[in-house]
Amino acid sequence: MTTVAAVDTREEVKQRMTQVSADPTNIFAVAYLQLCQVSYLDPTDIPAAVVALPPIDSTGSWQCIWGPAQSSDDSNLVFVAAFVMSGLPIFAAVVTRGTDVNINDGWGVVVQIWEDMDVTRQVPLSWAPGNSARIAGGTADGLSDIQSLTSGGNTLLQFLGTYLSDPANQNPVLVVTGHSLGGCLTSVIAPWLQSALPNELHIVPATFAAPTAGNADFATYFQTSFGYSLRVFNSLDIVPLGWENINGVDDIYDTCNLDVPDLVYAGAKVFSDLMSIAGVSYTQPATNQVPLTGACTTSDVDWYGEALYQHHTTTYMTLLGGTSVVSSPPLPARRRSAPSRLRKRFGPARQLPKSVKR
């Protein structure tokens, strides 16, 4: 893995990680994504996995400094890692896990799905009274859960307030990152922390495969709140289409010769109509986007297998040019999806006639 130059000082590294990268491989994005990969491990394995991560500088090392903290139903998990050079942290990273159906608590899976899909309800930001920015109800529920988590007797905010203000740490950058649902939650955790922590703190939000968190006013609020952020998405990943362009799932795998299943086709239309009835819409922040050009898997998978492959962290890592610290999921050969009868009959989901909308 490419590392920062040996001649870079601590301040030079901090400067590089808070501006657009001109390098073919953004080593910081790779490091953040590796942290996201670690977040899906068993919580008891996370601290050791953080320590074992490849360093971004030959003189540096990783530490897990808070957490992992997990909700009682296993639905949300967050931890804080720090990269240290010459005894001083360059940055601390708040890492939020995405949707994980392999947890032990079945109710926790339901809660995660609720956080993903409760999008017809939008709520204001609790720390910005009167602000027209709104976020999805499920995202707000996830944020509330994370705000209440504790490790070592401290909430995330209490820990960061002490750690980042400690003169001995000399003002490290604060990175907030996550993949999938974790990326969506990152979009609201970062501005929440910015509102609650000292103004001089430099915060870098970095999301991977994140669905949309809020409305157009929230996107504007987010864009104007941070001098630099990263939004990394794969052009063949369906998850970032939610919820700004949910009907985009209709034809996303045409180039892979895979028809959208009727269940997905109809589901996208139902959500689109429900959001329209509720009078809500979603907009992704437009600044500092990092689109990755996806390629169809060479495995003989159906539509669902393709979607799993395109959304997985290892696919994102390959597209970023980095090295994964977890294994790719198995993709057994499956029969091809049957041609979509609904799409064949009615065309693109966004153009379904009113009789079908009902």
Image (cartoon, rainbow, N blue to C red):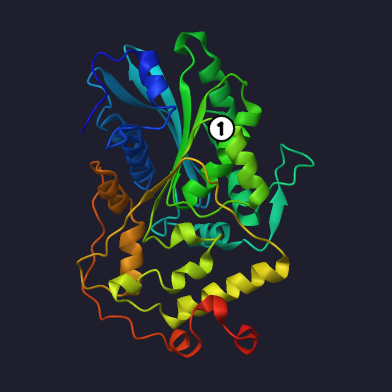
Relative height, residue 291 to residue 53 (above, below): below
Asked whether the viewer can see residue 209, the reply is yes
Establish if 11 lies above or below 300.
above
Residue 33 lies, in percent from the top left, at 35, 41
Residue in the image at 37% along x and 48% along y: 40
Outermost right residue? 130
Question: Crowdedness of circle 1 by 10 Å Cα count: few (<14), some, many (20+)?
Answer: some
- Name the residue tied to disc 1: 226
Q: Is residue 147 above or below residue 216?
A: above
Image quadrant where one finds the N terminus: top left
Can residue 144 be spotted in the picture? no
Q: Is residue 185 left or right of residue 312?
A: right
> Which residue ends up furthest to the front in the rendered image?
22
In front of the other: 90 or 166: 90
Q: Quadrant of residue 29?
A: top left
Between residues 142 and 12, which one lies in front from this camera angle? Answer: 12
Q: What is the count of numbered marks?
A: 1
